[in-house]
Image: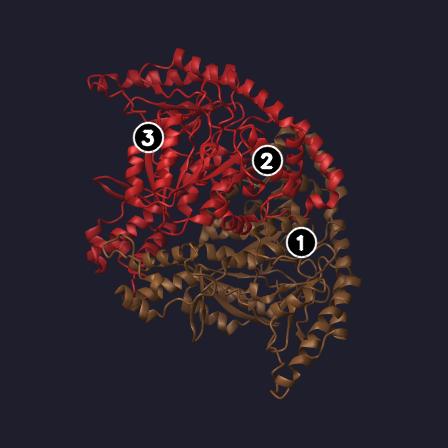
Chain colours: A brown, B red
């Protein structure tokens, strides 16, 4: 408690007391006076010490939690988060190249150990040899010869007009009818989430996400100081009853969703569920952010339509990145924005980076106009389907029966549940010594805490390595199970994970 | 008052009353129930109507103001801002190309009238024929042949390591000694401001800016929900007495400054002032954001050293864009970050757009390593100096004596003060009909309100057009002066602007 004794709050300040307390404790965390996993004082005790109301402490703790400074454990209290670890995780798993390891090593946290020769189930990004480099070099040079200096001027914040045109044509192949006015160019999906947040979210607003969900979305929402509510999502998609309940109770501004081949789980909503989902969002006046992660990579379902293609009420903002199916280094994607939100989104994009590279926009426009993209998507589907099938086969053949996994119909992600009592980070530590790496599932929850789930992605692994990697993981898990047998075997059902 | 009657506030809510009121009024503004320049109810009346404390209304109005929803006029009350107009202005004046006008026309606000044949003093961006396109095409192709797919993978969020290396070498030419670890790559200066804000600012924090200052910085700070205090800045640079006073009173987190050839005024601090400025910031524990807009473009001073080169306490974050001196379409720049802030800045960059285009980073790295950049800077200085000198000559020769202007020693911007009683937006309306366009000064203040200052930039105007443009402006102003003579001439000193 001694560390909290020196906190000074001013009753006559313009600043509300709980904000002052929030800032004071944040200061202690940032200055490392209180450290990761340190427990914060019980509410009543801190209130007594500082001679303030319990409610003020509760509010300050809530705010610290919503900003990711602390986490709560039911029944045991509030603890300081390991912020830096989070950002390390995020950086590792989304980046594809060796430089990231160099720069992350500079952080000297010792967690980053991915090496070139590893079997990398962590990366959700295609490997460079799959990129359409030659085709893209051709369009780049064509643009430079055609546009010269214009290719290096500021582009409109909204995006290069001809590209926005050719995107509306590209979208026809996906049954989305929209107009050039609705298209906002962005520097990748992450920026899309960031720009939408900036335009629509104010401090104290509420956002709903699927649980689990994309780490980058969580980080962005947290940075806006909003409340995040998680709705359980399983193989059938999001739980609509809980969703409606939260819509009623929490009056959210928006919901962020990946209804097809979801990241990290690979799950999809049925058509029926998508329809109902849209109805509910419209009824309760909640804007839907649809992150179309990979609806293109459909292998075994007829229900991979996007929410946007079903959106009759202009209530969906659609995000599409070109990173996963073309090349991440383009840093290019687009939003489909309902007209009523156009100006706010444009202003937010402008304050973010003024505009996306005109050279890349012009080159990609040519790439779309020449219909080269279709050929590439067919190629990528062929490559990924082989990996996908190998993954299913390997899991079925090699995984111990105590391990469960979802049954995705497309995409690149598999969500694995370890037997109750095992944590993904334990498995991570073991398997990285055997040159296999994946993403522990905890990072896909706002709390960021370790649990027994993990994500395996096939984007960066050759078929033969998929089988080898799953074999190594299975062996490691089997050893655990044997070791723990004497302790746990008697407890029935203890191995049954809920997926 | 009728429009406010339906506001419902809950006393038992987790949300503080003034936040509820803020959200309610924001709703009225966003739904256009109350419109631009509508007056908000007097504080006491609204408090009575809703049966709440006066202070709650004051706090809600303050919050609305800090977020740009309303503005205050001393003595007459609080009024709804024209938000959309702001974003239009920003988008126009920073973008350089015809597509922007297309997309802005879609907004259908009728304010955008810049055409190709106009004398464009508004743009602060070089015109495309000045870009080193051929050189850059060469390095692009060299990178594509050398790195193939790697050029299109995710780059590290921190930036491409070799580029960060070559930037430290480039900086030696500017007397800045720093290490690769301090360099953070960004997608242009605007993103730099955005990323720093995300990393360091929390809702309710305080930021200090020069007055006037860069519109894009204002917009970003506003979007973080911080309080912005403006310190008067004139030909001598920032007012250090006011600055110290604000440091003491308002406990700011950071100060944003352009100490060399400032935007929009062109002013610079003396070495003495820079030294004292750094001392004060360090003493009061305020982080300095130095936006090195154009210290390279020095024509007539020996005092264009950067704050960073004088920063002995690792208290300056330095922002450098390559847009103004190389090509804006690169969307490339860098930060020099004090080591203690490294992780926070990296995490903020990651949530913004994961990473900056690897292709552009690799090409620019080659461009620096081959020392081609030096040649280009010499070329640009020659071009700009001719324009700069022509501007000075034209202003001296042609402007009515009632008009004052600053006396910059370099850069591209001139800050013009009209005689008292004339507004820049009046002049704007007149002169755009005569095919001359500039930026009215109001946009460079957080209030965004019209005043009698304007910015003339020479970046996009040929010398012969500079003279012609100033002639047209002078004629227009002279006509005003004559027309107003009968009204104003008797009022002595009424023409003297304070610069």
Pair 2/1: label in front: 2
x 71%, y 77%: residue:
A400
- A268 w.r.t. B185: above or below: below
- Give the farthest residue toward the bottom: A490
* Relative image position of residue A425 (x, y in whole percent): 61, 67
According to the image, label 2 marks what residue? Answer: B167
Secondary-structure class at tag 2: helix
Q: Nearer the viewer, mark 2 or mark 3?
A: 2
Do marks 1 and 3 both belong to one polypeptide chain? no
Q: How far is the residue under mark 2 from the one under mark 3?
A: 40 Å
Which chain is mark 2 on? B
User: For numbered disc 3, what is the local secondary structure?
Assistant: loop
- Among the two numbered marks 2 and 3 on one chain, the one whose residue lies closer to the N terminus: 2
The dot on residue A324 is 1
Residue placed under numbered mark 3 in the picture: B451
Q: Residues within 10 Å of mark 3 (few under 14, many from 20)?
A: many
Q: Is residue A475 visible?
A: yes
Instruction: Report the residue at 32% width, 24% height from top.
Output: B499
Q: Which of the chains bears the disc numbered 1? A: A
Q: Chain of mark 3?
A: B
Q: Residue at x 58, y 49 (%)?
A: A106
């Amino acid at each position: 408690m001694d560390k909290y004794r020196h906190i000074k709050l001013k009753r006559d300040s313009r600043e509300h007391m709980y904000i002052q307390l929030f800032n004071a404790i944040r200061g202690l965390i940032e200055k490392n006076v209180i450290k990761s996993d340190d427990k914060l004082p019980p509410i009543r005790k801190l209130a007594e010490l500082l001679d303030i109301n319990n409610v003020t402490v509760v509010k300050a703790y809530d705010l610290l939690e919503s900003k990711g400074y602390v986490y709560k454990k039911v029944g045991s209290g509030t603890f300081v988060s390991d912020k830096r670890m989070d950002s390390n995780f995020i950086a590792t798993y989304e980046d594809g190249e060796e430089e990231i390891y160099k720069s992350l090593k500079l952080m000297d946290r010792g967690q980053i150990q991915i090496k070139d020769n590893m079997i990398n189930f962590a990366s959700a990004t295609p490997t460079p040899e799959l990129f359409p480099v030659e085709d893209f070099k051709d369009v780049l040079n064509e643009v430079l010869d055609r546009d010269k200096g214009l290719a290096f001027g500021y582009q409109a914040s909204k995006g290069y007009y001809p590209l926005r045109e050719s995107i509306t044509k590209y979208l026809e192949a996906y049954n989305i009818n929209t107009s050039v006015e609705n298209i906002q160019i962005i520097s990748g999906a992450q920026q899309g989430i960031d720009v939408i947040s900036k335009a629509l979210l104010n401090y104290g607003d509420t956002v709903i996400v699927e649980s689990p969900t994309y780490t980058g979305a969580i980080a962005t929402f947290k940075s806006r100081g909003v409340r995040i509510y998680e709705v359980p999502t399983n193989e059938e998609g999001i739980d609509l009853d809980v969703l409606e309940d939260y819509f009623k109770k929490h009056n959210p501004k928006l919901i962020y969703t990946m209804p097809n081949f979801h990241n990290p789980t690979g799950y999809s909503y049925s058509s029926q569920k998508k329809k109902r989902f849209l109805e509910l969002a419209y009824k309760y006046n909640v804007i839907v952010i649809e992150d179309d992660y990979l609806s293109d990579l459909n292998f075994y379902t007829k229900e991979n339509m996007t929410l946007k293609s079903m959106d009759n009420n202009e209530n969906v903002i659609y995000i599409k990145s070109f990173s996963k199916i073309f090349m991440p280094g383009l840093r290019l994607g687009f939003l489909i924005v309902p007209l009523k939100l156009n100006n706010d989104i444009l202003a937010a994009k402008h304050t973010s980076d003024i505009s996306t590279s005109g050279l890349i926009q012009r080159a990609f426009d040519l790439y779309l106009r020449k219909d080269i993209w279709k050929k590439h998507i067919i190629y990528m589907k062929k490559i990924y389907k082989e990996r996908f099938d190998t993954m299913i086969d390997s899991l079925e053949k090699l995984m111990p029966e105590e391990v469960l996994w979802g049954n995705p119909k497309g995409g690149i992600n598999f969500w694995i549940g370890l037997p109750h009592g095992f944590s993904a980070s334990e498995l991570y530590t073991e398997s990285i010594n055997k040159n296999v790496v994946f993403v522990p599932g905890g990072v896909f929850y706002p709390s960021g805490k370790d649990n027994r789930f993990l994500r395996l992605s096939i984007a960066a692994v050759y078929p033969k390595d998929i089988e080898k990697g799953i074999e190594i993981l299975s062996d490691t898990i089997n050893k655990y199970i044997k070791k723990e047998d004497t302790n746990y075997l008697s407890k029935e059902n203890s191995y049954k994970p809920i997926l």
